[in-house]
Amino acid sequence: MTNELVVTDRLTKTFGNRTAVRDVSLTVRRGEVYGFLGPNGAGKTTTLRIVLGLATATSGTATVLGLPAGDSDAVVRTGALIEGPGFYPYLSGRDNLRSMARYRGLSDREVDEVLERVDLTARGKDKFKSYSLGMKQRLGVASGLLGTPELLVLDEPTNGLDPAGMADMRKLIRELADQGQTVMLSSHMLAEVEEVCDRVGVIAGGKLLVESSVRDLRGTAATLVRAEPLDAALAIGMRLAGDDGVHLHDGASMRLDIDPGRAPEVTAALVAEGIRVFEVRPIEQSLEEIFFQLTGTPVDTTLAADSISTERQVA
Ligand SMILES: Nc1ncnc2c1ncn2[C@@H]1O[C@H](COP(=O)(O)OP(=O)(O)OP(=O)(O)O)[C@@H](O)[C@H]1O
């Protein structure tokens, strides 16, 4: 049994003379929620389509559950929500799933189980067309869960949902993960990836820029110091962090590019020079800044209110 459920190796896809995906090598491990993060047009959907066997690569390989992407056994063991599944508007949610289940030789009992998992049991008998967007999307996830897939692939699962619908969907994905479900999802929202995902692959312009845990991506390698007089403090800062490791911050503090674990040493050095120390604390880069540094693309401003609140004023 492989623990690397998705492995792509230098995956490349071109459309005419446009390269949508270029040399993407990523790994999704069993039991994790993997966030494929990137701005619109980055190549996320194209990559997921190849992983799901809906498109072929121009070069490179994609392996799913240890099998070539598109292999019938890999397809059967993978659930997906991509480009919105087609549901019959005048059938109930449950009957829509039943028709899918029968087609695949699955029992009605399994339909009731997946409805329960996405919290739609109470509305299962209502017509699909009466559902909110969030419920429709949850029904889409339910359809992806039919057949107890080892891997669930969700393309922008919260796209178009209102804040409450987004929150419901994120909660659902975390619940599925807590039940052991491996999920690979795409998103253009940093806050979402931070909230939901264990690991992240950042893609822009078709290239995978970084792959790491959200925590490692952000890092905490800087220390904020508020002290007076600041000029004297800056001189000590340079002694400790080097000339390039000191940055003015807010006009009243400095950021030192040194591990926050050295806070006692920093404090002692400042105090030894008669400098008054008001604050020494770890400082995190915001994911927005990291994203911008990696991609050269600012985060979608419509997401600002939704973003993670962390230190945003690194000099
Ligand atoms: N069938 C196609 N024919 C031509 N170009 C395509 C095709 N599919 C995707 N592309 C192009 O490939 C690039 C990557 O598209 P893709 O849909 O994979 O990005 P994405 O990251 O999923 O973005 P979005 O969230 O906007 O869908 C885009 O420039 C897109 O226009």
Image (cartoon, rainbow, N blue to C red):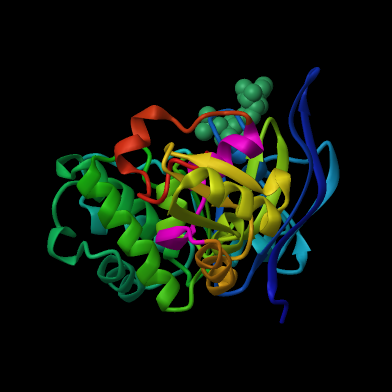
Q: Which residues are magenta?
A: 274-295
- Indicate whether residue 293 is drawn in magenta: yes
Q: Nearer the viewer, residue 220 or 144?
A: 220
| Residue 109 percent coordinates (x, y) | 31, 76
Residue shown at 24% from the left, 44% from the top: 163
Nearer to the camera, 251 or 178 = 251
Q: Position of residue 286 (x, y in %)?
A: 48, 47
Q: Quadrant of residue 219?
A: bottom right
Residue 94 position by quadrant: bottom left
**47 left or right, relative to 111:** right
Comparing 269 with 308, the one in front is 269
Counting from the top left corner in percent of width and height, residue 255 is at 54, 49
Residue furthest front as drawn: 274
Task: Describe residue 246's horizontal placement relative to residue 287 as left or right.
Answer: right
The residue under the point 24% across, 48% down is 165
Residue 110 visible? The answer is yes
Task: Say above or below: 13 vs 60.
Answer: above
Task: Indicate whether 280 appears above or below 19.
Answer: below
Measured from the top left, where is residue 1 in percent x and y?
71, 82
Horizontal relation, residue 234 to residue 125: left or right: right
